[in-house]
Image (spheres, helix red, strand yellow):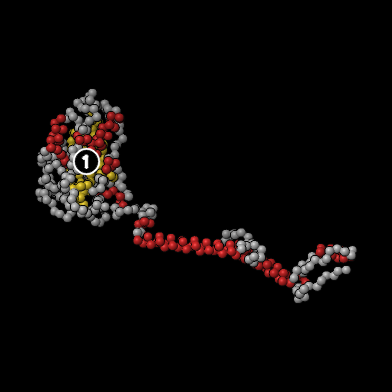
Amino acid sequence: MSTVPPPENPGENSAESSFSDEQLEAFMREAAEGGGAGAPKEPSARARMVARRLREQDEAAVREQGRRRRWGRKRKPEPEAWTPPGWRTGPAWQEMNGRAGRRRTVRSVVWVVLAVALAVVAVKPSLVLDRIPGRASGSPEAAVSASPLPAETALPTAAPGEVTQAGLPTREHPFLGSPALQWADGAGAIELPDAKAVPGLSKDQVALALRRTKEFLVAANLDPAVLRGEQPEKALGLFDPKQQSLLSEVRRSLREPTRENEPVEFFSRFNPDEVVLVGDVVKVRGHMTFEPGRRGEVRVHADYTFVYPLARAHGDGDVVTRTIIRRYLTVTMADPARLRATEGKLWMEAWDASYGNDECGVDDGYFHPSFPDAGPTGAPPTGEAADPYDRSRDLLTDGAGDGAEEESCGVVSRV
């Protein structure tokens, strides 16, 4: 008859025995019957110590989790029972070492990239600052030009305020220090009002009159060839040929300009041997309106200021000046079946202009701007000082209009 073997370590508490009541009962029954398998072996003292340590650590982990929850933090997953490496689960040491190596490599690369980025930002902070939402990018002008003025629909009530950007214009920043920095560019600044029918003319006919007026303004004041002093053939082609005396006079002014008859009354022209346009942008501000004339006729009013940045034609100097030209124009377009007119052509009814930064007493068919590093070479100014950017003044109340001569030459308060 088999007997239960004594524990290997008598000092261990008998309660730590791994025999269950069912196992003992089965063992005693088999022994009474004289057969059966051998008695189950009790784990060694070392195995029991390890098992007890594992249970204690599992219980400690559960207690710690309970303490965390009482502070009201976000509940975390239940902790897994503590396991010595290699005892139950866990990666092999080679795999762990490989992951650590990859982490070290990634961290090294990140630090190198970060150091390079910080160095670049230190040298040129605009690369980052210009991408901050709400911050303008690029040149010193960008902070202002990023917020263009809304389109003008009527004459303003006052001249533009003083400009905060300091410094003189340069080839890179030709509108620095100018109120025109917030104006729209070129032909896009000439916005047409919504066309409506007038007595005797349909909406489409009025729309054609508005388009032809814009075409004339662009051809006379923004065409690069005309600005270089070439003949304004496209603009001349929009004159109504039935207005023969005016058309002949304008053509004669282009051939033989005089003080009484200069082409600059209609066209913006600069002597290419003296100055060149800086860049390809001309700033423009103004508005266009229309009203019915006689039955079968529409009258279009255009009032625009053009700002031209200019540099000397010879030499590589960075000195830039600006000439500011404001033009007022009233043209009509009529139904040839009702009135004396040519289909699709413009009849010049009234015109006037003021020129800012143009030499006095020079009447050769071109504008002649002064530069800040040199004094004027023309006749001394005799009129009052004026702000060429002031669009609140009505040209018709101060100028002659209708081509009549009433000229004064003063100084400009700014360019």
Please tell me which residue is depicted at 80% across the width and 66% down the height of the picture. Answer: 40
Give the side of residue 132 with respect to residue 297, left or right. right
Residue at 18% across / 49% down in the picture?
313
In front here: 130 or 319? 319
Provide the residue designation for mark 1: 225
Looking at the rendered structure, the number of numbered marks drawn on it comes to 1
Q: Picture coordinates of residue 11 (x, y %)? A: 76, 76
Residue 66 sits in which quadrant? bottom right
Q: Quadrant of the N terminus?
A: bottom right
Residue at the far top: name it. 337
Which amino acid is tagged 1?
A: Ala
The answer to whether residue 281 is seen in the rendering is: yes
Q: Position of residue 104 (x, y in %)?
A: 51, 64
Residue at the extreme bottom of the image, as rendered? 11
220 versus 162 height, above or below: above
Front-lying residue, 3 or 241: 3
- The part of the image, by quadrant, that contains residue 221 is top left
Question: Could you tell me which residue is drawn at 13 percent across and 51 percent down?
Answer: 376
Residue 32: horizontal and vertical position, in percent? Answer: 89, 65
Q: Is residue 89 above or below residue 236?
A: below
Vertical arrangement, residue 219 with respect to residue 149, above or below: above
Q: Is residue 259 left or right of residue 119?
A: left
Query: Image check: 204 left or right of 381?
Result: right
- The residue at the point 61 percent across, 62 percent down is 91
For the residue carrying disc 1, how many other residues have a C-alpha within 10 Å: few (<14), some (14-19), or many (20+)? Answer: few
Residue placed most toward the observer, 16 or 352 = 16
Helix, strand or loop under label 1: helix
